């Protein structure tokens, strides 16, 4: 599992051109019509949907139609640091 992204952390991302090739359980930046989110993608029983899963237990999973995803970026690296 990748390290947790702390508040103010940076992520290095790479755009996915073919959304048919999703690595389930990997963390992605998901661009939806109203939001951009950093979430784990999980397989949904309905192949036209995906599950967006947050590392933060305060947030529930979200079922999203694949057709609602405008673009998808795989998270290649996470850079966390603290400012004192």
Image (spheres, grey):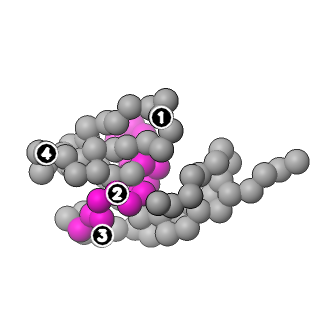
Q: Quadrant of residue 46?
A: top left
Tag 3 near tag 2, CB within 8 Å: no
Q: Residue at x 32, y 36 (%)?
A: 62
**Is residue 37 at all visible to an observer of this figure?**
no
Q: Is residue 37 above or below residue 1?
A: above
Residues packed near mark 4 inside 10 Å, few (<14), some (14 to 19) or many (20 plus) = few
Where disc 4 sits, the SS reads loop
**Is residue 21 at all visible to an observer of this figure?**
yes
Q: Nearer the viewer, residue 80 or 67?
A: 80
Q: Which residue is mark 2?
A: 25
Query: Which mark, by number, is residue 15?
Result: none
Total tally of numbered discs in the picture: 4
Query: Which mark, by number, is residue 17?
Result: 3
Q: Residue at x 30, y 65 (%)?
A: 23
Q: Which residue is mark 1?
A: 57
Q: Is residue 84 magenta?
A: no
Task: Provide the residue span drawn in magenta.
Answer: 21-39
Q: Is residue 80 above or below residue 65?
A: below
Disc 1 from disc 3: Cα separation: 30 Å
Mark before the other along the chain sequence, 2 or 4? 2
Query: Which mark, by number, is residue 45?
Result: 4
Q: Is residue 66 above or below residue 10?
A: above
Mark before the other along the chain sequence, 4 or 1? 4
Disc 4 from disc 1: Cα separation: 22 Å
Mark before the other along the chain sequence, 3 or 4? 3
Mark before the other along the chain sequence, 2 or 1? 2
Q: Residue at x 83, y 50 (%)?
A: 83
């Amino acid at each position: 599992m990748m390290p947790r992204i702390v508040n103010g952390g940076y992520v290095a991302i790479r755009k996915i051109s073919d959304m048919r090739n999703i690595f389930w359980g990997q963390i992605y930046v998901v661009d939806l019509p109203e939001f951009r989110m950093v979430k784990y993608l999980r397989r949904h029983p309905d192949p036209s949907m995906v599950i967006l899963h947050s590392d933060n237990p305060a947030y529930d999973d979200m079922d999203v139609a694949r057709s609602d995803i405008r673009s998808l970026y795989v998270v290649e690296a996470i850079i966390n640091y603290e400012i004192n």
